[in-house]
Amino acid sequence: MARSITRKTRGHQSPISRKKSHSSTDFGHRNYSLYVNRVLKEVVPQRGISSRTLDIMNTLINDIFELISMEACSLMCFRNRCTLTPEDLQKAVYLVLPTKLAKYAVAFGSEAVQRYVHS
C-alpha cells in the first residue's frame, strides 16, 4: 500500500502537497513578455501593451516555437539522423511559416547566430 507524503510546516501545507496553478508559463513554456515590451518600446516608444495582449503574444510565440521544433524533429528523424542541424531548422521554418515571413525569419536568425559566434 502506497503512503502519501504530507508534511506540515508551521501550519501551512508543504510544497509537495500544494497544488500548482495552471498558467501559460508552466510545462516548460517560457515567458517572452519582457522581450515583447523591449521590442515595442524600440519601435514605438510612446505606446504600451496590456497584460492580456502580452499573454496572447506569449502563447503565440510558444505555439510557433513548438510547431517549428516538432517539424524540425520530424525532418531529422526522416533523414535518419540523431543530430538536429541548422538546415533542419531552416527547412522547418520554411514549412511552417508563410513564404515571405520564413525568408525574413531565416535571414534574421542566421544573422543573429553569426553575431553570437563572432562575439
Image: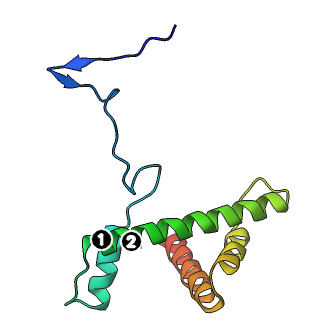
Q: Secondary structure at mark 2?
A: helix
> Please, what secondary structure does the residue beneath circle 1 have?
helix
Callout 2 crowding tier (Cα within 10 Å): few <14, some 14–19, many ≥20: few
Is 72 drawn above or below residue 28 in the view shown?
below
Residue at 56%, 77% (x, y): give it.
114
Mark 1 nearby-residue class (10 Å; few <14, some 14–19, many ≥20): few
Q: Residue at x 72, y 69 (%)?
A: 88
User: Mark 2: which amino acid?
Assistant: Ile
Residue 41 picture quarter? bottom left
Q: Residue at x 27, y 25 (%)?
A: 14
Q: CA distance from mark 1 to mark 2?
A: 6 Å
Disc marking residue 56: 2
x, y percent for residue 37: 29, 76
**Amino acid on which the number 1 mark rests in the picture:** Arg
- Does residue 99 appear to the left or right of 80 in the view shown? left
Q: Position of residue 28 (x, y in %)?
A: 47, 51
Q: Verify CB contact (< 8 Å) between mark 1 and mark 2.
A: yes
Query: Who's the residue at 19% across and 90% down the image?
Result: 46
Q: Which residue is mark 1?
A: 52
Q: Position of residue 53 (x, y in %)?
A: 32, 75
Q: Give the x, y percent position of residue 67.
A: 61, 67
Indicate whether 99 appears above or below 50. below
The one nearer the camera, 50 or 82, is 50
